[in-house]
Image (cartoon, rainbow, N blue to C red):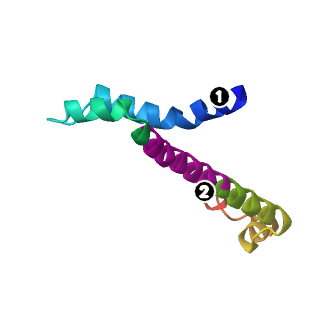
Amino acid sequence: MKILSVLWKIFLLPGKFILWDRYMHPPKGKIFQTGRQRRSLFHQILFSLFGWWVIIALLAETLAGLAADSKQEVQRRVTPNSQTQQSQNVTPSPSTSVRQQVF
């Protein structure tokens, strides 16, 4: 029973935070509306669902980006591109200047 109470409070945290922020910084002319929303359980649940949706979307996007980056890194290690191979096989001739060797 106590675990459900703790989970319920954790679930409501994003909604309570969003509503608190709206209460502290209300749009012009909506002071009373934001005060009523802050105390409403319905609005806390609604904004919590939105908050968790945003959190999950951001985490999924971040993890997908990390997975794509690691996949590209593995591909770079396994098969180096032709430009890297060409740059490794280039030997400068004695007649070329240092500037031409660098650039």
Residue 37, percent from left and from top? 33, 35
Residue 79, percent from left and from top? 82, 69
Q: Is residue 50 left or right of residue 84?
A: left
Up/down of 91 relative to 52, above or below = below
Q: Quadrant of the C terminus?
A: bottom right
**Quarter of the figure with residue 69:** bottom right
**Quarter of the figure with residue 6:** top right
**Which element is circle 1 on?**
helix
Q: Residue furthest left?
A: 29
Looking at numbered disc 1 in the image, what kind of residue is underneath it?
A: Val
Identity of the residue drawn at 64% across and 59% down? 97
Q: Main secondary structure of the magenta part?
A: helix
Up/down of 49 relative to 95, above or below = above
Look at mark 2 in the image and give the residue it sits on: 99
Up/down of 41 relative to 70, above or below = above
Looking at numbered disc 2 in the image, what kind of residue is underneath it?
A: Arg
Residue 9, percent from left and from top? 58, 30
Question: Relative to the observer, which residue lies in front, 55 or 97?
Answer: 55
Q: Quadrant of the N terminus?
A: top right
Answer with mark 1 or mark 2, whichever residue precedes in sequence: 1
Question: Relative to the observer, which residue lies in front, 62 or 22?
Answer: 22
Q: Residues within 10 Å of mark 2 (few under 14, many from 20)?
A: few
Q: Residue furthest right?
A: 78
Identity of the residue drawn at 49% across and 44% down? 51
Looking at the rendered image, the disc whose residue lies closer to the viewer, 1 or 2, is 1
Look at mark 1 in the image and give the residue it sits on: 6
In the image, the segment drawn in magenta is 44-63
Q: Is residue 89 magenta?
A: no
Q: Is residue 91 visible?
A: no
Q: Is residue 49 magenta?
A: yes
